[in-house]
Amino acid sequence: MAAQTFLAVYKDRQGKEKNLRLKASDLASAKRSLRQRGIIPVSLSSDTTGNEKVRQGLSLSLEKVPAVKDKAVFASQMAALVSAGVPIVRSLEILAEQQKLPMFKRALLRISKDVNQGSSLGAALRRWPKVFDNLSVAMVEAGEAGGVLEEVLKRLAKLLEDNAKLQNQIRGALGYPVTVLVIAIGVFLGMTIFLIPTFAGIFEDLGAELPAFTQLMVDLSALLRSSFSLLLFGGLLLLIWLIKRAYSTKVGRRRIDGLTLKLPLFGDLIRKTATAQFCRTFSSLTRAGVPILMALDIVRDTVGNRVLSEAIEASKNEVQQGGTLSLALQRRKVFPTMAVSMLVIGEESGGVDAMLSKVADFYEDEIAATVKAMTAMLEPAMIVIVGGIVGSILLAMYLPMFSVFDNIK
């Protein structure tokens, strides 16, 4: 039998996870070879990751990546199957058959095969970073290590559902005014470019003198129909490109994210959302048994704002040196005072995860109330803006009629 390449994941004396590739005729031979070296693997599977990455890069780059809601449904269904006593390999096969997303389906089938060959579920999930993020992988690994995979999967499903709910609330708050504003700008440009010149020509034929406001709109229409509009459009595209280019750099993203936190109305909403997500995620991770430093690494990458991420990273360094998380976050002054104060109480009482869960509940309610109030305030404001734009165009068209009536008299 031809030799195969196997990938062994094991931990060294310091507890750090390492990978080892070895050749053997089959899985049993690979296990014997590792025992002879004194290595006890966390997982051992056929090494197909190199080819898998190439295939993912070629065939999956244009496929739809599973959304947070998709992963929440998977975790919930997986927990139900495990609770019913269905083996993990069979559970993965069942869920793969139900999947409509090609990438998700392919990932679950591959993960099922890896687990069947001796890999742990967490290690198998880690090989599909486009499908399963660090948060999901860490919680599954902690559940496997503690023998409470079913419970952890339920918590993961709840956490992902809460995160999806938060994202939908933010999209709802930001999407409405942006959509209305785009429509208003489209109506303004359409009426200015196409409608006003027609009326201006009619009034000119009638010999009516155009009022100053109407003349201003006619001049604006002419300007928008000239080459200046192309320059303006090109300038806007250039500005968007420069902002995206700046956001891709470390310094640029920090500055832009810092400015978003200072925006009227939306800045406070973004801060509350990040706080709720930080508290909910950190609470779920620590309750699942994930080490605090690893949990801080994960929430740092999922909080979604560079300023807050750097504050969490700096706080992690202080915790690593023996400091408390609450004091470290308090020094950064980026999270709300109430959240930090509740964290202090949680540290003193030994119930950090329970306290942060309550803080997350509080801020999620605050976000819902803020979104509702913001929508109630923005709806009439948007109506006034659209009405003002349309009214201005109509006023510019009807004002010259008075001059026409005077000439007729």
Image (cartoon, helix red, strand yellow):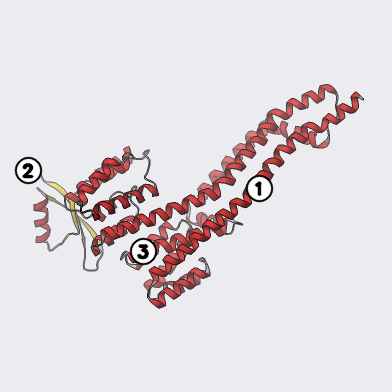
Establish if 60 lies above or below 208: below
User: Callout 1, which amino acid?
Assistant: Pro
Whole-Å distance between the Cαs marked 2 and 3?
A: 44 Å
Callouts 3 and 1 close, C-beta under 8 Å:
no
The 10 Å Cα crowd at callout 2, few under 14, some 14 to 19, many 20 or more, is few
Callouts 2 and 3 close, C-beta under 8 Å:
no
Question: Does dot 3 land on a helix, a strand or a loop?
Answer: helix
Q: Nearer the viewer, residue 68 or 292?
A: 68
Question: Does dot 1 land on a helix, a strand or a loop?
Answer: helix
Can residue 337 be seen from the camera position used here? Answer: yes
Q: Earlier in the sequence, mark 2 or mark 3?
A: 2
Q: Nearer the viewer, residue 156 or 303?
A: 156
Whole-Å distance between the Cαs marked 3 and 1?
A: 43 Å
**Which label is found at residue 1?**
2
The 10 Å Cα crowd at callout 3, few under 14, some 14 to 19, many 20 or more, is many
| Residue positioned 39% across, 71% down in the render | 352
Please identify the quarter of the rendering in which residue 288 is found: bottom left
User: Callout 3, which amino acid?
Assistant: Ala
Residue 199 location (% of width, % of height): 76, 26
**Which label is found at residue 107?**
none
Please identify the quarter of the rendering in which residue 219 is found: top right
Q: Earlier in the sequence, mark 2 or mark 1?
A: 2
| Apparent side of residue 10 relative to residue 212 in the rendered image (left or right) | left
Q: Residue furthest bottom?
A: 348
Q: Earlier in the sequence, mark 3 or mark 1?
A: 3
Whole-Å distance between the Cαs marked 2 and 1?
A: 75 Å
Q: Nearer the viewer, residue 208 or 35?
A: 208
Residue carrying label 1? 380
